[in-house]
């Protein structure tokens, strides 16, 4: 330690040669510095955690859950699949041999000769034999042309290569013209490409041959059945192209059988897609097959698809050769439609429609009233009167609508509506029929009055509108006439002919004047329901009926043949379910109608 020195009589402080050290650093001068922690374990831990997270999410995803049982199923079936592939390989070569033999021996044309010989038609036999000779001559001519062209092309190519090689031997390429150098470059490139491709062809050629043979020998049944996913949540309701094609292939229709036997594949104009509570598809059928043929075997088609007949609806599309197929989800058509939406509250606009029931898609259908006339029928106790009552009740909830009801029998189904009805008669005597005919006559006169009133309005509107109906002074409000058991009226000995004429007249002309007819019958035959009534009503409803005559009598001519059939509905089991046309933009609807018990206390 230095001490103060004396300098000229003064004390001089000592000088220290040192460096200032910060306080924090000074405290750790004698301690060893910690080594930096390596980053590799941290990165490894993060990578492991991220990988585990990704794998866990993938394992828990719906896609993985769907494919796990598929992979497990395929592993269990692996020996069987290997055996099938080997069989496809053998059968593919067999098919090639058969096709080659048929081509060499004109087997397809010789079958025509045999058929003509069996039919005893010498002219057809001579024509078939001439066709064989002409085909053989043309075939050999084509073969000669191909061989000659191949020989000429090969000779020209070899000659060109020989000339190029000779020129290259005599002259240096640097002294050649540019165009000739380009020719040599192209030759060299093509040679290199050949040397590169040939080894791959020698390796991939046999593989391609095997694949082609397996493809040729594959099962010709529709679709790839071995790709079926066996475990699905919706397995009972799932319908796809493979299932539909397989169901049609085993339908027992001869042209379809021949089509699939020859390896044909159906054309799906609309692929199977979810449509409400079911699946819809549109299929173009092969030559010689109509949608009616498929509809005639509806029970077999339903069995092939694993469905009940009520859940399978094959119908004709715009063309006879195009099939519309709607298949319900299993069990979706069971049970009723539920409570009527307007049972406790709400109003109806007759120009907008009335809640009528649930379609096969599970959607509430708003049945039209304005500009519509209805014909409802079916066997006794299947729901026709209930459907008529629902429409009438809905019309009653429009305060501007006037209601007339005639029941041609002793049935109290409309008694609760009596306070709301302007005219009401029930019974089986002649006076009820006379009053019903008088009502039709009064409506015919009212139709003429409304026509004059409508024509006198500014702009001469073509039909009654909501705005005009609300003007009470004009008297253009909706006027609904409902006749239950209308066959009794049309078959009445005294009033039947007049009732038919008036009803047809009103159905044809009254719709644009706000006059609506609702007809219900349990006897929809050609004698009980006039043909002109069936032809001109816009909405036809058929509950379970006995035959195609009753079916077409309610839904219109040709509907049974097109596959729109209420004959498939079962008595009691399908009570309340009907087939309806004209109630929506679709060609037909399968409707589970709302049921409003007659004992319910209505408040019109």
Image (cartoon, rainbow, N blue to C red):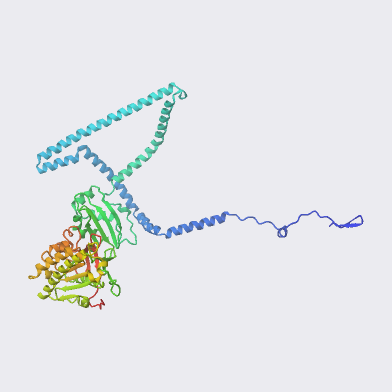
Residue 436 lies left or right of residue 582; in this view the side is left
Q: Quick check: 340 above or below 172?
A: below
The N terminus, quarter of image: bottom right
Among all residues in the image, which is located at the extreme left? 493
Residue drawn 57% across the image and 54% down it: 40
The C terminus, quarter of image: bottom left
The one nearer the camera, 524 or 498, is: 498
The one nearer the camera, 572 or 421, is: 421
> Is residue 377 among what the camera can see?
no
Q: Where residue 152 sits in the image (x, y, percent)?
A: 30, 27
The one nearer the camera, 274 or 371, is: 371
- Toward which corner of the image does residue 45 lie, by quadrant? bottom right
Q: Where residue 151 sits in the image (x, y, percent)?
A: 30, 28
Total labels: the figure holds 0
Q: Where residue 268 sits in the image (x, y, percent)?
A: 27, 52
- Toward which corner of the image does residue 99 lie, by quadrant? top left
The one nearer the camera, 78 or 335, is: 335
Residue 144 lies left or right of residue 69; in this view the side is left
Q: Where residue 313 sits in the image (x, y, percent)?
A: 23, 60
């Amino acid at each position: 330690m230095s001490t103060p020195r004396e300098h000229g009589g003064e004390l001089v402080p000592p000088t220290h040669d040192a460096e200032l050290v910060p306080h924090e650093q000074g405290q750790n001068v004698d301690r060893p510095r910690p080594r930096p922690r390596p980053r590799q374990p941290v990165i490894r831990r993060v990578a492991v955690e991220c990988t585990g997270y990704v794998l866990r999410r993938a394992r828990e995803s719906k896609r993985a859950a769907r494919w796990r049982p598929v992979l497990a199923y395929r592993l269990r079936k692996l020996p069987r699949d290997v055996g099938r592939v080997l069989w496809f390989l053998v059968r593919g070569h067999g098919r090639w041999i058969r096709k080659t033999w048929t081509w060499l021996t004109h087997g397809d044309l010789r079958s025509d000769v045999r058929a003509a010989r069996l039919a005893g038609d010498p002219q057809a036999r001579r024509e078939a034999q001439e066709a064989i000779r002409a085909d053989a001559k043309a075939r050999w001519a084509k073969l000669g042309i191909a061989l000659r062209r191949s020989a000429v092309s090969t000779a020209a190519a070899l000659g060109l290569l020989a000339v190029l090689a000779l020129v290259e031997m005599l002259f240096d390429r640097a002294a050649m013209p540019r165009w000739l150098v380009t020719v040599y470059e192209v030759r060299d490139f093509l040679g290199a490409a050949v040397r590169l491709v040939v080894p791959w062809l020698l390796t991939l050629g046999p593989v391609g041959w095997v694949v082609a043979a397996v493809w040729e020998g594959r099962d010709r049944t529709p679709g790839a059945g071995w790709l079926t996913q066996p475990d699905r949540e919706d397995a009972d309701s799932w319908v796809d192209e493979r299932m539909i094609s397989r169901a049609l292939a085993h339908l027992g229709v001869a042209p379809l059988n021949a089509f699939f036997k020859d390896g044909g594949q159906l054309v799906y104009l609309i692929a199977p897609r979810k449509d409400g509570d079911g699946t819809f598809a549109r299929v173009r059928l092969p030559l010689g097959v109509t949608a009616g043929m498929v509809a005639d075997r509806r029970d077999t088609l339903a069995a092939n698809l694993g469905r009940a007949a009520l859940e399978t609806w094959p119908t004709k599309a715009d063309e006879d050769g195009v099939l519309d197929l709607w298949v319900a989800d299993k069990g979706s058509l069971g049970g009723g439609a539920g409570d009527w939406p307007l049972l406790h509250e709400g109003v109806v606009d007759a120009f907008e429609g009335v809640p009528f029931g649930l379609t096969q898609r599970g959607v509430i259908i708003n049945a039209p009233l304005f500009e519509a006339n209805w014909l409802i029928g079916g066997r006794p106790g299947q729901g026709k009167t209930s459907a008529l009552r629902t429409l009438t009740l809905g019309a009653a909830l429009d305060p501007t609508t006037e209601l007339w009801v005639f029941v041609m029998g002793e049935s109290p189904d409309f008694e609760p509506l009596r306070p709301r009805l302007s005219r009401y008669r029930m019974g089986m005597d002649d006076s009820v029929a006379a009053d019903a005919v008088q009502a039709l006559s009064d409506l015919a006169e009212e139709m003429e009055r409304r026509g004059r009133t409508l024509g006198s309005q500014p702009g001469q509107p073509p039909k009654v509108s909501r705005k005009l109906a609300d003007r009470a002074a004009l008297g253009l409000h909706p006027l609904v006439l409902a006749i239950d058991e209308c066959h009794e009226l049309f078959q009445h000995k005294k009033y039947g002919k007049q009732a038919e004429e008036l009803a047809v007249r009103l159905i044809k002309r009254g719709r644009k004047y706000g006059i609506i007819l609702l007809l219900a019958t349990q006897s929809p035959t050609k004698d009980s329901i006039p043909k002109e009534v069936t032809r001109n009503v816009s909405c036809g409803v058929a509950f379970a009926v006995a035959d195609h005559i009753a079916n077409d009598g309610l839904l219109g001519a040709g509907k049974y043949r097109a596959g729109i059939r209420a004959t498939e509905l079962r008595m009691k089991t399908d009570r309340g379910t009907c087939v309806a046309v004209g109630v929506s933009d679709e060609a037909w609807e399968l409707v589970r109608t709302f049921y409003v018990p007659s004992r319910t206390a209505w408040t019109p």
